[in-house]
Image (cartoon, helix red, strand yellow):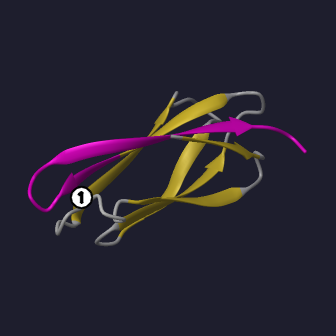
């Protein structure tokens, strides 16, 4: 899990590298990104992409002073599932 700072006006790319010895011949078959808490004016998923060993998302918005938990849940080509999380704090500059 990583902890990141973001301004409300920024649209930032975040990625998870599922390779690096973890996949053992498998690939990412499906990826889903979730933001908690989901709230009006909160952090939102703009776009998401999936490559065989990497997933990425562009996050935008967010309410200053809030911390959001962003979770990427994947299904691998052999049917196994796993998840990785990020914590994003929204701060004004």
Q: Position of residue 75 (x, y in %)?
A: 20, 52
Q: Position of residue 9 (x, y in %)?
A: 77, 52
Reply yes or no: does residue 53 show up in magenta. Answer: no
Q: Nearer the viewer, residue 69 or 9?
A: 69
Residue range (magenta): 73-93
Residue sitting at 30 percent across and 55 percent down? 31
Asked whether, in this view, residue 73 is left or right of residue 70, the answer is left
Residue 48, placed above or below residue 68: below
Give the quarter of the image for residue 84.
top left
Residue sitting at 77 percent across and 28 percent down? 65
Give the quarter of the image for residue 88.
top right
Q: Nearer the viewer, residue 17 or 33?
A: 17
Query: Most prominent secondary structure in the magenta stretch?
Result: strand
Residue sitting at 37 percent across and 65 percent down? 20
How many labels sit on residues? 1
Q: Determine whether the residue tagged by mark 1 lies in a helix, strand or loop.
A: strand
Disc 1 designates what residue? 30
Q: Residues within 10 Å of mark 1 (few under 14, many from 20)?
A: some
Q: Nearer the viewer, residue 40 or 90?
A: 90
* Residue at the limit of the structure toward the front, as seen here: 21
Q: Position of residue 67 (x, y in %)?
A: 65, 29
Q: Position of residue 24 (x, y in %)?
A: 20, 64
């Amino acid at each position: 899990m990583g902890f990141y700072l973001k301004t409300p006006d920024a649209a930032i790319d975040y990625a998870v590298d599922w390779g690096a010895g973890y996949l053992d011949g498998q690939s990412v078959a499906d990826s889903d990104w979730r933001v908690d808490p989901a709230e009006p004016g909160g952090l939102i998923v703009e776009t998401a992409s999936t490559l065989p060993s990497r997933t990425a998302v562009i996050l935008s918005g967010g309410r200053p002073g809030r911390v959001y938990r962003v979770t990427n849940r994947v299904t691998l080509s052999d049917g196994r599932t796993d998840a990785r999380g990020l914590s994003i704090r929204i701060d004004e500059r």
